[in-house]
Image (tube, rainbow, N blue to C red):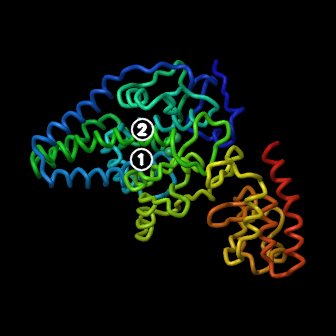
Amino acid sequence: MTTEVNVELPESLRSHRMRATASESVLQGTVHWSAVQSLWFTGMSAAAIAGGVAWFSWGALLLFAGSTGIVLLFGHSLGSHRKLIHDSFQCPLWLEYVLVYLGVQVGLAGPLGLLRQHELRDYAQRLPDCHPYLRHGRGFWVDAWWQLHCELRLVNPPHIRIEERIASDRFYQFLERTWMWQHLPVALLFYLWGGWGFVACGVCARVAAGVFGHWLIGYFAHNHGEMHHEVRDAAVQGHNVRWTSLLTMGECWHNNHHAFPGSARLGIQRGEWDPGWWLLLALRRFGLVWSLRLPEDLPFRSELVRRNEHGQHRKSPWADVFQAILRPVELRGELVWPGRYLGAAGLLCLLGPDTPSRLDRGASRMAFKLPDRTILGLPALCVAASRRDILPVRVAAILLAPIAVLFEHSRRHR
Ligand SMILES: [Zn+2]
Ligand SMILES: [Zn+2]
């Protein structure tokens, strides 16, 4: 008999593709050498070094840089991660296939295998504890050995439910069976184009760098770097690895990703360069992608705690609300109203024409959205009302704000 543990989990995990059969299911397991994984990485690295030295040319180096950039940006970041795994934007099916195919060219796994690995880690990292393999929790060298050459065998692994759309897709099933062989046609093409040097740099070095880089960023993104948010009671936190934003196509903003996994945009704050997001914006101009999901479109997570610039928790729950009230009025923000209590006319009467407001019957709570933060519940109404041109309304809103914050704070910590 299986007992589901999901009743004790945060709301956000109940709709996860993973389901545990026991609370220790992501904890009890052993790490074993994986012949396929180890030989794949070692073979590609050896061929890259030997071939790169024997047949070096600037053209081959350029091919390495160009093809690596393309498969990381279009394939891994957009195809595999932001689309297939998180479905954070919409696009035509043919484009999804092209992007996912390029993702397979990174050489990490097949599309379904990559999805399974990602979901297991994502699920395990959000639980109070998980095996150190799943959270990059041992030292640098042990982690390198584990992630590049070994696999984790869990005693009682969680189930995964992959939606029909992906699980029964013939193309994805084909790529899953043949992902290693998918490098052969590219190798042949590069051989005809520039000989063995092009194969060594354009295929072997690209795969070796992709697999190695994926581990290296994974290690740092779970151990070192800035944090804007903390996921309460999670086994491990994500960190932003700022200096790798262009190399990783924006995937390095891993603290943001732990906070907002369903967001198509990973670099959220000013100065957080995110080439994957830039590409999505460009594709949107041509009508090739749409419905790009942002942090404010995601459901509220009670386990998410904001930190200030210095990485500490915000000093008080008041800071967010009062900073918003004290903001210059030009930074107006927008009130999103669930429409449960008042219709559009009532809302206009309450807030006047000055504050932009939007009726959204699908919204679960009222929210005041500023470019860099969202304030929820009654405090949102106070911030919105504090922007009215009528002085008594403003004063009342500011006076009522502390009570609203107290109320909201007690609601979250019930
Ligand atoms: Zn993570
Ligand atoms: Zn992810």
Q: Is mark 2 within 8 Å of ligand 2?
A: no
* Left or right, residue 91 beside residue 309: left
* Left or right, residue 115 beside residue 128: left
Q: Quadrant of residue 172?
A: top left
Q: Is residue 274 above or below residue 9?
A: below
Q: Is residue 50 above or below residue 241?
A: above
Q: Where does the C terminus fall, quadrant-wise? A: top right
Q: Position of residue 400 (x, y in %)?
A: 88, 64
- How many numbered discs sit on the rendered protein? 2
Name the residue rendered at 41%, 59% in the picture: 275
The residue tagged 2 is 114
Amino acid type indicated by mark 1:
Ser
The residue tagged 1 is 80
Name the residue rendered at 10%, 44% in the picture: 55
The answer to whether one can see residue 300 in this image is yes
Name the residue rendered at 66%, 66% in the picture: 370
